[in-house]
Amino acid sequence: LLEEALRLGIGDMLIVLKDPEAVQSCIQAGVGAQVSLKVGGKTDDMHGAPVPIQGHLRTLTDGHFIENRPIHGGGHFFYQGLTAVVETEQKHTIVLTSLPMSPMSLEQVRSAGITPEHKQVIVAKGVVAPRGAYEPIAAKIILVNTPGATDADLSRWQYKRRRCPLFPFETNASYQCEGYVKGFMKE
């Protein structure tokens, strides 16, 4: 998505990428330095190649943050590894983390000095986890199907065994509750 945003000339964008190698390069350069990095695309060959960026190293953090709201997954204390924030020449804010972290909390980027509400475009990788954090501040959520092991469009997968009808494949699907969890539903 970063590569496509660069190609289209999209500015004022926030994206978080796990790239421990780029974080180490940022640490060596120091806050305030101009950096030239190749970010992302280093985990496997399903997600594209590393993308070259140039920018100003704005912040380095220890990667710890606290989320006090109820969120997807239910945690409160998080660690995304050493973290660097690079402001690119194209006005992209790229948060580089040493460890993988689901984008389920605005505190992930606020802890690095970023106000996500001020961004025009925010890329939050995930289908469910980002919604609780980003829907309240987003004018619009756009699901994007990218290569990888997960997909926002379930119809793109082949199924050998599934019941029919089943939403979202058939819009007339209905669900009949055959039991209950005590205290969750009326008896």
Image (cartoon, helix red, strand yellow):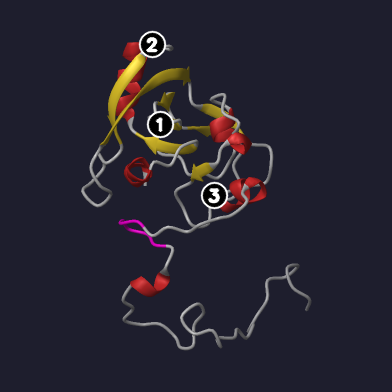
Q: CA distance from mark 3 to mark 1?
A: 24 Å
Pick whichever, 99 or 169, lies toward us. 169
Image x and y of residue 110, in percent: 59, 30
The amino acid type found where label 2 is placed reads: Gly
Q: Residue at x 76, y 67 (%)?
A: 183
Percent x, y for residue 25? 30, 19
Cα–Cα gap, marks 2 and 3: 30 Å
Q: Residue furthest front?
A: 9
Instruction: Tell me if I can see residue 77 in this picture.
Output: no
Q: Which residue is mark 3?
A: 130
Q: Main secondary structure of the magenta part?
A: loop
Q: Which residue lies under the disc numbered 1? A: 90
Location of residue 66 in the rendering, given as x and y in whole percent from the top left corner: 61, 32
Q: Position of residue 108 (x, y in %)?
A: 54, 34
As drawn, 129 above or below 182 = above
- Residue at the spot of label 2: 30
Question: Closer to the camera, 116 or 179?
Answer: 116
Amino acid on which disc 3 is placed: Pro
Whether the residues at callouts 1 and 2 have beta carbons within 8 Å, the answer is no
Q: Nearer the viewer, mark 3 or mark 1?
A: 1
Give the magenta range.
Answer: 146-151
- Please state which amino acid type lies under the numbered disc 1: Gln
Q: Check disc 1: other Cα within 10 Å, few if <14, some if 14-19, many if 20+.
A: some
Q: Residue at x 44, y 86 (%)?
A: 163
SS at mark 2 in the image = loop
Q: CA distance from mark 1 to mark 2?
A: 21 Å
